[in-house]
Image (cartoon, helix red, strand yellow):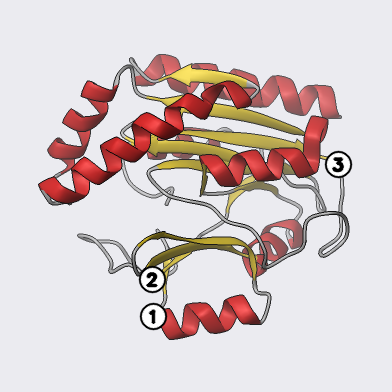
Amino acid sequence: MGVGSWELGVGSWELGVGSWEWGVGSWELGVGSWELGVGSWELGVGSGELGVGSWESGAGKTSIVNHLLESGLRLGFSVSATTRKPRGSEKNGVEYFFLDAVDFRKRVSEGQFVEWEEVYNGTMYGTLRSEVDRIWGSGGHLLFDVDVKGGISLKKVFADSALSLFIMPPSVAELEARLKNRGTDTPEVIAVRVGKAEEEIKLAGMFDTIVINDDLCTAQAEALKKVRDFLSGAE
């Protein structure tokens, strides 16, 4: 995710500052979960630092992500992997790494994922360690695409070293309207996403701050201010 003019989603993200090592601590790489629908994206600061975040389909996530990527804060977007089929003009390695189920599970067994989850029956999503290494290796700050549960689990790992921001649409009704207007999902899929969103929005209080995307420009400015303030305090 992170490419395109806007995307539907409620979600959250966190900005992380500090350092840690793969496989060190109470959380092990390749173990963990995340879901899509309400999702999360993450920001990391420095060459060995990580942050966490989440949103839901319908909150204008991609526009806010792109706004941050263009802000000059040296943010690098981590492309997630999925077993779902590409939608519309999506390209492998841009919006997602599109893998078949066999390849995905092989990577899981090899510990190539920071976190992963079978979100819907037969559809898996995950965050690749290689993406983290790529961005850290360039000295950038990480911007991830994970969901609310993933955001919560990563926040537990990084605690005060991460800023978690939950981005959501003004209402569930507006979320449903945005999903319908997107035109990429069947009514049945939309119903599942909306139902999941209703439950996951209840977890918004577990994040450091909430941004309601009623007006996109306002939401972009608010998110950017939160990120800049956090980065300034971490330096």
Position of residue 191 in the picture relative to residue 75 (left or right): left
Amino acid at circle 1: Asp
In the picture, measured across the screen, residue 170 lies left or right of residue 176, that is right
- Residue on which the image places disc 3: 18
129 and 92: which is toward the camera: 129
Instruction: Give the quarter of the image for residue 96.
Output: bottom left
Residue 61 percent location from the top left of the image? 41, 36
* Residue 12 visible within the image: yes
Front of the two marks 3 and 2:
2
Label 2 packing within 10 angstroms: few (<14), some (14-19), many (20+)? many
Percent position of residue 87, x then y: 23, 61
Which disc, if any, is residue 135? none
| Helix, strand or loop at mark 2 | loop
Give how far across and how far down residue 108 sits, in percent. Answer: 59, 75
| Marker disc for residue 83 | 2
Mark 3 against mark 1, which lies toward the viewer? 1
